[in-house]
Amino acid sequence: MVNYLVVLEVPIVLKNVGTRDDAANIAIAQVGKQLKRVNLEYVKIEIGASRCPNCSGLFNSAFVVGKMGLVGVYLSMKVFNAETVKHAENIAKSAIGRALKDVPLKTFEVRQIKD
């Protein structure tokens, strides 16, 4: 059995936001509240990163158009005693999926944690 860090990428859609910073803060608070409801406070929440098509620089994945926000969020969860990478991924998706119903979960990264 092996321990893994699983990072999932999720899109959060928000209404009535004014700025990118507002959207990012609201998304983190909303996801945190949903995770707390199912006792997943230990899941790390971060704003995702997007690459600029012109300069290739990275920037926060928070976009606002017409008071509608789209925020890319990374959720990191340690999975202990998994049999395989796929097993760790499935455990994380199942646990986080209970909190974030109807939100698509995409695997961003799975890596083994050294003891």
Image (spheres, rainbow, N blue to C red):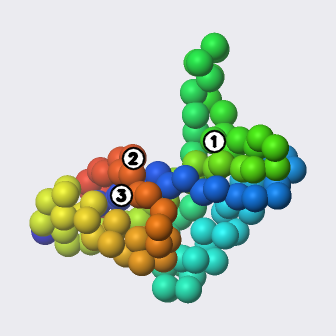
Element at label 3:
strand
Q: Is residue 41 above or below residue 14?
A: below
Q: Nearer the viewer, mark 3 or mark 2?
A: 2
As drawn, is 64 to the left or to the right of 6?
right
Residue at image position (61%, 29%) is 58
Q: Where is residue 13 shown, x and y percent of the image?
A: 64, 56
Q: Where is residue 93 shown, x and y percent of the image?
A: 34, 66
Residue that protrudes farthest toward the top in the picture: 54
Q: Hey, what amino acid is under mark 2?
A: Phe
Question: In what quadrant of the picture does the C terminus appear?
Answer: bottom left
Q: Which residue is mark 2?
A: 108
Residue at image position (44%, 58%) is 104
| Foreground pick, 84 / 97 | 97
Real-space CA distance between mark 3 and mark 1, rounded to the nearest whole angstrom: 19 Å
Residue at image position (48%, 76%) is 99
Element at label 1:
loop
Asked if residue 21 can be seen in this view, the reply is: no
As drawn, is 88 to the left or to the right of 71?
left
Report which quarter residue 15 is drawn in: bottom right
Mark nearer the N terminus (3 vs 2): 3
Task: Using the image, tell me which numbered label, if any, was put on residue 95.
Answer: none
Q: Which residue is mark 1?
A: 61
Count neighbours of disc 3 (C-alpha within 10 A) and say few if under 14, some if 14 to 19, many if 20 or more: many
